[in-house]
Amino acid sequence: MHDGQRALVVDPGDAQPVMALLASERLSLEAILLTHHHADHTGGVDALRNRFGAVVYGPASENLPEPLVRLSEGDHFQALGLAFSVIDVPGHTAGHIAFYCADAAGAPLLFCGDTLFSGGCGRLFEGTPAQMLASLDKLAALPGDTRVCCTHEYTLANLAFAVAVEPDNATLRGHRAHCEALRAAQRPTLPSTIALERQINPFLRTRQSAVSAAARRFDPAAQSDVDDFAALREWKNQFK
């Protein structure tokens, strides 16, 4: 993300492609935003900070390359002249955060790391199903035009699973065909929007009767919203 002169980067796992883009666009790097501690999101931090002197922002409680500004829900900061707020979204990791910018040009922006993907969500490496469901509920409550900027292009695999869960969802089937065409043309499926994810993402739809019923077919012991979410996540872990 940049304003023509200054840029920010989110979760730079590798410094080299970031440096190459900054050089080609003649941009300086003002800020580095980190959502969680995994190496594929932090591996480029030291090189970028050393080269550009960028300020690093990240979760309050995770093991991250120092120095950085540590943040948790309710905190605010400015980068590129824009106001960002922080949302705690534990689940994928214990201290995972997301960054929300309401006043970005065009529509709000959400940098959500590995919590919410288009058509899916992150694996639960450190958190519980209850935590992840609560985190996704927070993100689903954001304005519908919010652009969902996640950090992996997992959309086609996620949508294949989503169709297995909810085969009669016409919006989902249409979006899957659209994304298949995008990828065939070597174009990204991202960013998505919160409004779209509410319609096609099973992990945001666990309280819909069709999704709950599918989860309980996978795990007949499921009896609650959290149970349904846990069943869906385990089903996705096994899905081929």
Image (tube, rainbow, N blue to C red):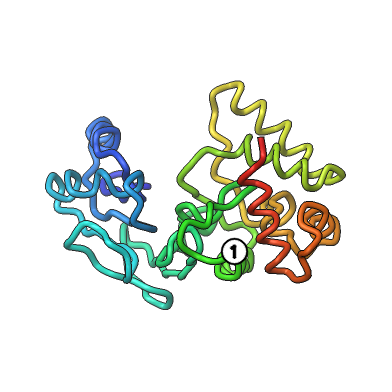
The quadrant of the rendering that contains the C terminus is: top right
Indicate left or right for 20 with 59 as reference: left
Give whichever of 176, 84 is nearer the camera.
Answer: 176
Is 208 on the left or on the right of 21, as rendered? right
Q: Residue 203 or 173: which is nearer the viewer?
A: 203
**Does residue 193 sit above or below 159 in this rendering?**
below
Give the quarter of the image for residue 27. top left
Which residue lies at the image location 48% right of the left edge and 52% below the top edge? 114
Report if residue 184 is visible in the image. Answer: yes
Which percent across, then down, holds residue 94?
A: 43, 66
Query: What is the quadrant of residue 139 in the picture?
Result: bottom right
Please state the horizontal and vertical placement of residue 21, each as a whole percent of the image. 29, 34
**24 lies left or right of 212:** left
**Residue reaching furthest to the front:** 221
Count of residue discs: 1
Quarter-of-image position of residue 178: top right
Residue 57 position within the rendered picture, expressed as x and y whole percent measured from the top left: 29, 62
Residue 99 in view in this figure: no
Q: Is residue 117 above or below residue 155?
A: below
As drawn, the residue found furthest toward the top would be: 185
Q: Amino acid at mark 1?
A: Leu
Give the farthest residue toward the bottom.
Answer: 74
Q: Is residue 165 above or below residue 125?
A: above
User: Between 129 and 203, which is closer to the camera in this rendering?
Assistant: 129
Residue 150 picture location, percent across and down = 49, 49
Q: Which residue is mark 1?
A: 136
Instruction: Please name the residue shown 45% across and 46% down the image.
Output: 151
Q: Is residue 204 left or right of residue 7?
A: right
Q: Nearer the viewer, residue 16 or 143?
A: 16
